[in-house]
Image: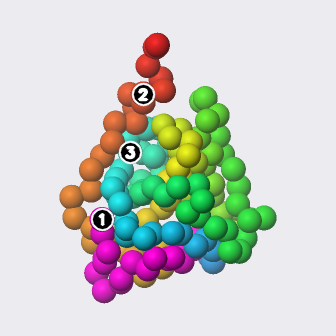
Amino acid sequence: MIKQVGDTEIQLKHKATCHCGAVELEIDLPDGIVDPRHCDCSICRRKGAIVASVLLSGIKIIKGADRLTLYQFNTHTAKHYFCSVCGIYTHHQRRSNPHLYGYNVGCLEGVNPYLIPNIKTYDGVNHPADRAV
């Protein structure tokens, strides 16, 4: 649980925005930033974001729902959202646990995710949902 990044204290309800400000989210973070990580799946390698997760009820779109663009691929389980104006990835409904959103830690107001030490990389290339049953 990360309660502070640099000089920024993580709020219980923290504001998150895309780059241009067209999209604004309120993210419930009662435990701070939990398990920040990279993923090496095909989309995450390209976007390069540090992500963490919250329950689906933990993200409220305050502004710009009409500016969010949905992108899905492969199994079409995960739902990746991007600002249609500036292109910033804000959040996604997770494939491995569709009851959670992953969110872009870099979108949290005042947070520089590169100040978070020891970011793990998860193996998204060998995703559990791709394994034969």
Measured in 3D between alpha carbons, the distance from the residue under mark 3 to the one under mark 1, in whole angstroms, is 19 Å
Measured in 3D between alpha carbons, the distance from the residue under mark 1 to the one under mark 2, in whole angstroms, is 25 Å
Q: Of marks 1 and 2, which one's residue comes earlier in the chain?
A: 1
Q: Position of residue 107 (x, y in %)?
A: 50, 70
Q: Element under label 1?
A: loop
* Residue identifier under label 3: 39
Q: Is residue 33 left or right of residue 62?
A: left
Q: Quick check: 14 above or below 72?
A: below
Measured in 3D between alpha carbons, the distance from the residue under mark 3 to the one under mark 2, in whole angstroms, is 13 Å
User: Marks 2 and 3: in contact by CB < 8 Å?
Assistant: no
Q: Please report the residue visible at 35 percent of the width from the left and 83 percent of the height from the top.
A: 8
Kind of residue indicated by mark 3: Cys
- Can residue 57 be seen at all in this image of the molecule? yes
Task: Decide whether residue 71 is among the magenta residues.
Answer: no
Of circles 1 and 2, the one toward us is: 1
* Residue identifier under label 1: 1
Of 65 and 86, nearer the camera is 65
* Residue identifier under label 2: 128
Q: Position of residue 17 (x, y in %)?
A: 57, 74
Of circles 3 and 1, the one toward us is: 1
Rate crowding at label 3 as few (under 14), some (14 to 19) or many (20 or more) other CA atoms within 10 Å: some
Rate crowding at label 2 as few (under 14), some (14 to 19) or many (20 or more) other CA atoms within 10 Å: few
The quadrant where residue 63 appears: bottom right
Residue 47's disc is none
Of 95 and 46, nearer the camera is 95
Magenta part of the protein: which range?
1-18
Q: Of marks 3 and 2, which one's residue comes earlier in the chain?
A: 3
Q: Of marks 3 and 1, which one's residue comes earlier in the chain?
A: 1
Q: Please report the residue visible at 42 percent of the width from the left and 27 percent of the height from the top.
A: 128
